[in-house]
Image: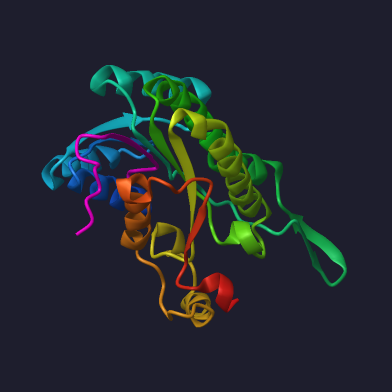
Amino acid sequence: MIATGLAGKVVIVTGGAAGIGKTTALAFAGEGCRVAVWDLDPRGEEVAAACQKAGGEGRFFRVDVSQKAQVEDATAQVVALWGGVDVLVNNAGIVRDGQLVKFKEGQLVGSMTDEQWEAVIGVNLCGVFNCTRAVAKVMVPQGRGVILNASSVVGLYGNFGQTNYVASKAGVIGMTRVWARELGRYGIRVNAVAPGFVKTEMLAAVPQRILDEMVSHTPLRRLGEPEDIAQAYLWLASDAASFVTGAVLSVDGGLVVGT
């Protein structure tokens, strides 16, 4: 087993109440970390309690990452509680799918709304910016830290009906590379993980035929599990990845090369 060097580290996981975020929070807790679960979903309380049972510490903070003041206040609370921040996992994300414009028999029948665009950009892109800016202010004086951003394979190659989501995830990749350049001199590593299609609540409403098609385009012939992504975050945060920054790690079963 690889020694992670994570015991006692303070970790913030946004969107930590369910899915990949929950699994990631528990994975860090299993390494003996002190985990701040940020979410609007009250199930975050249960995840924080589970972190205690997993071998670490856990606290739930009700945070809307799209709201700068809430993010800054929660960051201050984490620092007051545990003395700093060692790892930030920018996992929070939403989808509001729709075609840019939709025509039927030559007639415009729909388009992506301003609300759909702004909601996704607000959480998936502005939320990552808000959280990273707040936490970087803590990490720079410490002279250390790891920032991990959730992108997506669709941020690399696009996806039908997801202008807003793809724009946010491509933007995350761009910000990751900028921050790796800016923050590396302070001992802060910044990387992104680009998951493929993973078994979470986001896929619950997807018809089986679409899921089967996703699997057929994936060389490993399966959907991802939340644990696949959590383990990638764990490795990138660990001492084993101490010379890795500015990277985008695709955890997609080979989806990009299989497309």
Q: In the shown orientation, is residue 114 left or right of residue 202?
A: right
Q: Is 102 located above or below residue 113 in the figure?
A: below
Prevailing SS of the magenta stretch = loop
**Residue 233, position as x, y percentages in the image:** 37, 51
**Residue 96, position as x, y percentages in the image:** 58, 51
Name the one closer to the observer, 107 or 133: 133
Question: Which of the 4 image quadrants contains residue 188?
Answer: top left
At a point 45% along the width and 58% down the height, the residue shown is 202
Q: Is 238 located above or below residue 255 in the figure?
A: above
Q: In the shown orientation, is residue 247 left or right of residue 226?
A: right
Q: Is residue 62 visible?
A: yes
**Residue 258, position as x, y percentages in the image:** 56, 78
Question: Which of the 4 image quadrants contains residue 121?
Answer: top right
At a point 29% along the width and 52% down the height, the residue shown is 23
Q: Is residue 119 visible?
A: no
Name the one closer to the observer, 17 or 247: 247
Magenta residue check for 10:
yes
At a point 67% along the width and 65% down the height, the residue shown is 160
> Magenta segment range?
1-18
Quarter of the picture containing the C terminus is: bottom right
Magenta residue check for 29:
no
At a point 37% along the width and 18% down the height, the residue shown is 76
Q: Is 245 located above or below residue 131 in the figure?
A: below
Name the one closer to the observer, 61 or 169: 169
Q: In the shown orientation, is residue 161 left or right of residue 20?
A: right
Q: In the shown orientation, is residue 83 left or right of residue 220?
A: left
**Residue 207, position as x, y percentages in the image:** 49, 73
